Image (cartoon, helix red, strand yellow):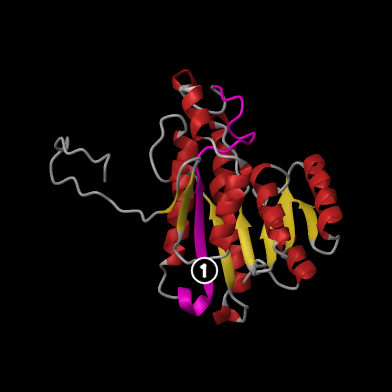
């Protein structure tokens, strides 16, 4: 049975390689039309040629863009609208994990996602004349739990998850005609986690390479999970976590530890 997309015109950031390239490939295979951005022009042009040869020049286009450059990002989004007619799926995928470049990382991982989301909202919302649509923001396992190796990266990914969930539960979400979803990958076999050292993460001496390898997913596994999210009949509020062994939807809840600190010895790890 052929895959049927509710959202065929796609704008995706960070599509030159890794997960972004994989997501773009899956969308194009499902008959979507995709504009993707990246800062790596050489890799992106190679990806563009590969996909144009495979899927047709009218179905995929690369535009060089740094999501931290607000005016350029907005200009690129308008170019995408002109090329596609309208955008009905926005995928904020661009990201980095280099703890030593924390200001840049916050700008890319969080501010870039916020800007991309808000641009898409204003374009899509039905209560302002748009056609509706979907927005998928890429968070991380580090956006679901505390991880000592990446406090700043994790902070940006917690922010992405919270930001997306807040928009998804807003009282005017039905009037907007927009659905919001979050994908939270565990470690994936991409450049993001290769050659981990003290520039990329903290306490790298405590990292257990065999444990990391055991939990690392292939890009292909993440492509399948991403398309699972894209193809949901009702996507709004969905938070999908996937690693090499697990693929489940999550709901974030706060645990009440009572009025005293330190808390009692209740084991919260099983909750």
Front residue (pair 77, 83): 83
Say how many tags the image has.
1
Residue 176 inside the magenta-drawn segment? yes
For residue 172, side relative to residue 197 (left or right)? left
Q: Is residue 19 left or right of residue 262?
A: right
> Is residue 268 shown above or below 162?
above
Residue furthest top as drawn: 205
Residue 233 locus on image (x, y percent): 52, 70
- Residue located at (45% from left, 29% from top): 149
For the question of whether residue 59 can be seen, the reply is yes
Residue position marked by numbered label 1 in the rendering: 179
Is 142 located above or below residue 209 in the figure? Answer: below
The percent position of residue 55, horizontal first and vertical second, equals 81, 59
Q: Is residue 31 magenta?
A: no
The local secondary structure at tag 1 comes to strand
Residue 74 is drawn in which quadrant? bottom right
Neighbor class of circle 1 (other Cα within 10 Å; few <14, some 14-19, many 20+) is: many
Query: x, y (%) of residue 191?
Result: 64, 34
Q: Residue at x 67, y 48 (%)?
A: 22
Residue 121 visible in the current orientation: no
Q: Give the residue furthest to the front.
A: 1
Viewport quadrant of the N terminus: bottom right
Which region shows up in magenta?
173-197
Q: Nearer the viewer, residue 160 or 182?
A: 182
Which residue is rendered at x = 45% and y = 41% of the image?
142
Q: Position of residue 146 (x, y in %)?
A: 38, 38
């Amino acid at each position: 049975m052929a895959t049927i997309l509710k959202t065929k015109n796609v704008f995706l950031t960070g599509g030159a390689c890794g997960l972004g390239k994989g997501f773009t490939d899956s969308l194009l295979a499902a008959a979507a039309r995709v504009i993707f951005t990246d800062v790596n022009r050489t890799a992106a042009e190679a990806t563009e040629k590969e996909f144009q040869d495979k899927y047709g020049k009218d179905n995929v286009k690369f535009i060089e863009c740094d999501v931290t450059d607000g005016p350029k990002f907005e200009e690129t989004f308008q170019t995408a609208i002109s090329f596609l007619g309208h955008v009905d799926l926005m995928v904020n995928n661009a990201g980095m994990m280099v703890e030593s470049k924390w200001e840049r990382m916050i700008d890319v991982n969080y501010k870039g996602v916020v800007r991309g989301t808000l641009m898409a909202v204003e374009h899509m919302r039905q209560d302002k004349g748009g056609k509706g649509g979907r927005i998928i923001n890429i968070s991380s396992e580090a956006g679901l739990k505390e991880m000592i190796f990446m406090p700043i990266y994790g902070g940006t990914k917690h922010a992405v998850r919270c930001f997306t969930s807040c928009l998804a539960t807003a009282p005017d979400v039905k009037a907007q005609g927009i659905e919001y979803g979050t994908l939270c990958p565990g470690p994936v076999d991409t450049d993001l986690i290769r050659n981990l050292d003290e520039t990329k993460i903290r306490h790298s001496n405590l990292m257990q390479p065999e444990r990391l390898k055991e939990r690392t997913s292939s890009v292909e596994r993440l492509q399948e999970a991403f398309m699972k999210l894209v193809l949901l009949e009702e996507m709004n509020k969905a938070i999908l976590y996937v690693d090499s062994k697990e693929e489940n939807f999550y709901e974030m809840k706060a645990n009440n530890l009572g009025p005293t600190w330190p808390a009692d010895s209740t084991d919260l790890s099983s909750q």
